[in-house]
Every structure is written in C-alpha cells, then in structure tokens.
Amino acid sequence: SVIDASGPTPCCSRPRSKMSVRPKITSCPVEGLTNVTKPSITIYRPAKEKDTGAAMLICPGGGYHNLWWQLEGEEVAAWLNSIGVTGILLKYRLPRRPDDAKGEYPAPRPLQDAQRAVSLVRSKAREWGIDPQRIGMVGFSAGGHLAIATATSFDEAVQRELGEGRPQVAHDG
C-alpha cells in the first residue's frame, strides 16, 4: 500500500504503540516495528519550492527482525525533505519466516518488497512529480544491506510486472 504523508510527524507527538523500544539516543524514543506481514511505502514530500524531483527509498535497519522506524526512517525522510528530496519510507516484511531458506540474506520477502517498491516508484514517478532517473535507495544496518542487495541483485528480480526494480544509486548508511 502507498501512504502519502505531508511530512514526517515528530515522533514525540505520536501516540505510543505496541512497538519494541530500544534506548533513547535522540530527542524521541526509538521504537522498532516488528511482525510486518504487509509491505507498504510512505511518501514524505519536500516543500514545493525546494523540490528537486529526486527521490530516495529509505530502508530502516533492525537486523531483519525490527524496523527502527523513527531514527532510521522518519528522521532520514525529514533530512531528505530539507534538501529537496522526496523520502519514501519502505516497510518491508519481517522477521524471517520458517519457510525462508536458512542463511540466505536478505530473505526473499524483503528483497521482493524492495524491488517492487523501486518498480512502483519508477512506474508512478511522473504522476508523483519524481524524475524516474533520479531514484535512489539508502538504508542502515540490515536496511543498508537490503538497499545494496536491491541495487546489485536486479537480474534476479522476482517482481517484474511493474518494470525495472533497480535504483539509480544505493548507499549503506
């Protein structure tokens, strides 16, 4: 599913959820999402006067067990918006499922979700005001691994119905 956000909601103003919590290292509590069964993307757009047409898919880390949503997702989207880049936060499926091959990283489902997200963003780019040649990925920890795997495993793409599933650039933060 696609969620269009007008901008990152400060994490401290949101109601507490049933998320796991790790030590507070920013001004907000750092919470992790887990047991994600339905992937989605949330779009955070910059102010119109700053918009460069570039977009970055953001893959939060969490060891493929959690997604550190605020620190490695919403805060990154806010920073990207400040420099005129659309931040697209990917909620990918995790943790690993019993039927996943042992020792295979990333597991097939997160890789499928990331490839599909790139394909979806590229297919909707013009409609969403994004330059289809300026779509990248950034990720942190396991999310960084996923971003790099998406950029380098494009020949093995399992989700091809929407087109090219490879970003123009990928960075492991």
Image (cartoon, rainbow, N blue to C red):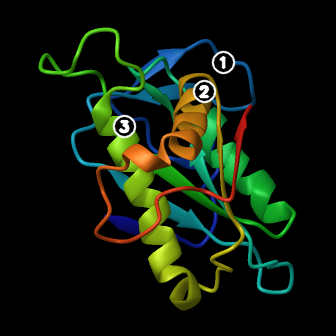
* Element under disc 2: loop
| Residue in view at x 54 percent, y 66 percent | 43
| Residue in view at x 74 percent, y 31 percent | 173
Q: For this view, does 133 lie left or right of residue 128? A: right
Cβ atoms at labels 1 and 3 below 8 Å apart: no
Task: Give percent across and percent down for residue 18.
Answer: 32, 29
CA–CA distance in space, label 2 to label 3: 25 Å
* Element under disc 3: helix
| Residue in view at x 69 percent, y 73 percent | 133
Cβ atoms at labels 2 and 1 below 8 Å apart: yes
Q: How packed is label 3: few (under 14 Cα within 10 Å), some, or many (20 or more)?
A: many
Q: Earlier in the sequence, mark 1 or mark 3?
A: 1
Q: For the residues carrying marks 1 and 3, which lies nearer the camera in this image?
A: 3
Q: Which residue is mark 2?
A: 29
Task: Give percent across and percent down for residue 160.
Answer: 32, 62
Q: What is the quadrant of residue 80 in the picture?
A: bottom right
Q: For the residues carrying marks 2 and 3, which lies nearer the camera in this image?
A: 3
Q: How packed is label 2: few (under 14 Cα within 10 Å), some, or many (20 or more)?
A: some
Quadrant housing the N terminus: bottom left
Q: Earlier in the sequence, mark 2 or mark 1?
A: 1
Q: Is residue 113 above or below residue 43?
A: above
Q: Which residue is mark 1?
A: 24
* Element under disc 1: loop
Q: Is residue 120 above or below residue 167?
A: below
Q: How packed is label 1: few (under 14 Cα within 10 Å), some, or many (20 or more)?
A: few
Residue type, mark 2 in image = Pro
Q: What is the quadrant of residue 148 in the picture?
A: top right
Residue type, mark 3 in image = Pro
Q: For this view, does 156 lie left or right of residue 134? A: left
Residue type, mark 1 in image = Lys
